[in-house]
Image: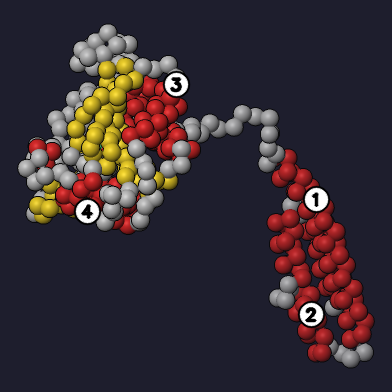
Amino acid sequence: MEDKILKIKETALADIENAKNSKELEDVKNKYLSRQSELNTMKKGLKDIEPALRPKIGALTNEVFKLLESEIDKKHQNFYKSELNEKLQSEKIDVTLDGTFNPFGKVHPLSSTINEIVEIFEHLGFSIIENKYSPEVEVEKYNFDLLNVPKEHPARDVQDTYYCYGADNIVLRSHTSNAQVRQMLNSAPPVKIISPGRVYRNESVSARKNNFFHQVEGLYVDKGVTFAHLKGVLNEFIRQYFGANRPTRFRNSFFPFTEPSAEIDVQCIVCQGKGCSTCSGTGWLEILGSGMVDPNVLKDAGIDPDVYSGFAFGMGVERLAMLKYAIDDIRLFFNNDERFLKQF
Ligand code: DAH
């Protein structure tokens, strides 16, 4: 019995000695110290041997057991340290190496133009309104009727406006002016808002026209608002957007929802006013429509035109971006050609 234990001790120590890594050491541990190991089986069998021999054999088994345990433990510590070191070496990160290059996305030139316009008006005291007051799929009533656009007005013609199939009073809005109406119906004056968004028109697509584009609508209604306020605000916008030196002009115009009405032209950026195909030979490009809100429009929105007055405007975002960056084809905004988009 004693010999057998000493033999186990010897082979176990040799196995420990020979283990080359913590995995092998673990196997050795299992072999000699697990419950099913020879030593443990012998411990359990102590009760079956001669009582006189029991203490001696018992003590010896324990001693060997403890010895093996501590030897394995010692070796384990060594492995742990050297294996950790190895791992740290092999997984070392050189922070001085170049990183992998992930190209950044960019803000679309139309989005940044809208942001710029919105920011200017916010500094002039206008608040941007929520989308729920300017849906793109709109009832004719808000796109036309309440804007004093008569039933027979050519703008309603299916040539210009997209009607939803099967619902002849639902349109894709043809301008952002629906936002004015909804805003006035929703809140009492003073109202001082801008509302950017997408609009749709049944145009044949060309370098100058697309069948959807973007506008920024503005509305200011309060007591005592005059045409001088309109001019002051829009001139300030143009000065901030184009700089002080770009020639602009107010031109008399007509819109059913404003009286009087004015359009603002900016000198053509392509020909500097000489006349070219971009500006149809006029030297000027229209950027916005505006005017004093028609009393009928105020009345229909529940606002007393004898107490309140206001001005409104709607500007074409693509036009403003094209003029600022000298872009000669509106379709470039919608093609998602990276060569174009990367330039902004
Ligand atoms: N809705 C007009 C258009 O799309 C632009 C416009 C003109 C808007 C005059 C206005 C306005 O608010 O007062 O051509």
Residue 105 image-quadrant placement: top left
Tag shown at residue 117 = none
Q: Residues within 10 Å of mark 3 (few under 14, many from 20)?
A: few
Image quarter in which the C terminus is found = top left
Q: Could you say whether the residue bearing mark 2 is in a helix, strand or loop?
A: helix
Lower position in the chain sequence, tag 1 or tag 4: 1
Q: Amino acid at mark 4?
A: Asp
Most distant residue in the front direction: 306
Mark 4, residue position: 300
Residue 282 image-quadrant placement: top left
Lower position in the chain sequence, tag 1 or tag 3: 1
Answer whether residue 113 is visible to the viewer in this image. no
Lower position in the chain sequence, tag 3 or tag 2: 2
Mark 1, residue position: 81
Answer whether residue 82 is visible to the viewer in this image. yes
- Between circles 4 and 2, the one closer to the viewer is 4
Q: Residues within 10 Å of mark 2 (few under 14, many from 20)?
A: some
Distance in Å between CA atoms under marks 1 and 4: 84 Å
Q: Position of residue 162 (x, y in %)?
A: 14, 43
Mark 2, residue position: 42
Q: Are marks 3 and 2 in contact (CB under 8 Å)?
A: no
Distance in Å between CA atoms under marks 4 and 2: 103 Å
Mark 3, residue position: 243
Q: Residue at x 80, y 90 (%)?
A: 48
Q: Is residue 168 positioned above or below 213 on the image? A: below
Distance in Å between CA atoms under marks 3 and 2: 98 Å
Lower position in the chain sequence, tag 4 or tag 2: 2
Distance in Å between CA atoms under marks 4 and 3: 38 Å
Q: Amino acid at mark 2?
A: Met
Lower position in the chain sequence, tag 2 or tag 1: 2
Image quarter in which the N terminus is found = bottom right
